[in-house]
Amino acid sequence: MNKTEQLTDSMFNIMAALTKPRHGYAIMNLIEETTKGAISIGPASMYTIIKKLLKQEWIYLHDGSDSRRKTYLLTEKGRDVLEEELKLRKRMIQLAETGLREEEE
């Protein structure tokens, strides 16, 4: 895997939403619903990130037959990147949880 940069939270969230084919509006809705409104990504940011993910070949245009509802999906490379990022984020969460528990003792 050639991941040259760490994913931003927005990139991570969009990639996580693209484990199934989804169009832009569905991606934004899923992220907002999943986080109960704590995270929302606007259309401008989302499409900028989608362009970047396409360029990296981490996602691809799954169905472009309706120009207003293009659906995207992770590539194999994108899946690998997402899995690596997930492992890293889990380790960071464990670090924080351990530190907070130790502080309470």
Image (cartoon, rainbow, N blue to C red):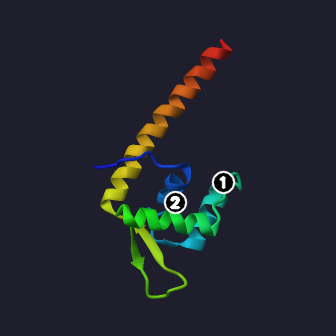
Give the residue drawn at x 53%, y 66%.
48
- Number of marks drawn: 2
Residue pushed farthest right?
37
Q: Which mark is residue 87?
A: none
Three-letter amino acid code of the residue under disc 2? Ile
Task: Choose the circle earlier in sequence order: 2 or 1.
Answer: 2
At a point 65% along the width and 65% down the height, the residue shown is: 42
Q: Is residue 76 left or right of residue 66?
A: left
Q: CA distance from mark 2 to mark 1?
A: 11 Å
Compared with 31, 87 (above or below) is above
Quadrant in the picture for residue 88: top left
- Image: 26 above or below 86: below
Measured from the top left, where is residue 24 in percent x and y? 56, 72
Question: Does dot 2 land on a helix, a strand or a loop?
Answer: helix
Q: Residue at x 50, y 52 (%)?
A: 12
Residue drawn at point x = 41 percent, y = 51 percent? 82
Crowd tier of the residue under label 2, counting other residues whose Cα lies within 10 Å: few below 14, some 14–19, many 20 or above:
many
Foreground of the two, 66 or 48: 48
Q: From the viewer's perspective, is 23 left or right of 62? A: right
Q: Position of residue 35 (x, y in %)?
A: 65, 53
Q: Residues within 10 Å of mark 1 (few under 14, many from 20)?
A: some
Q: Which residue is mark 2?
A: 14
Rendered view: 91 above or below 73: above
20 relative position to 44: left or right: left
For disc 1, the marked residue is: 39
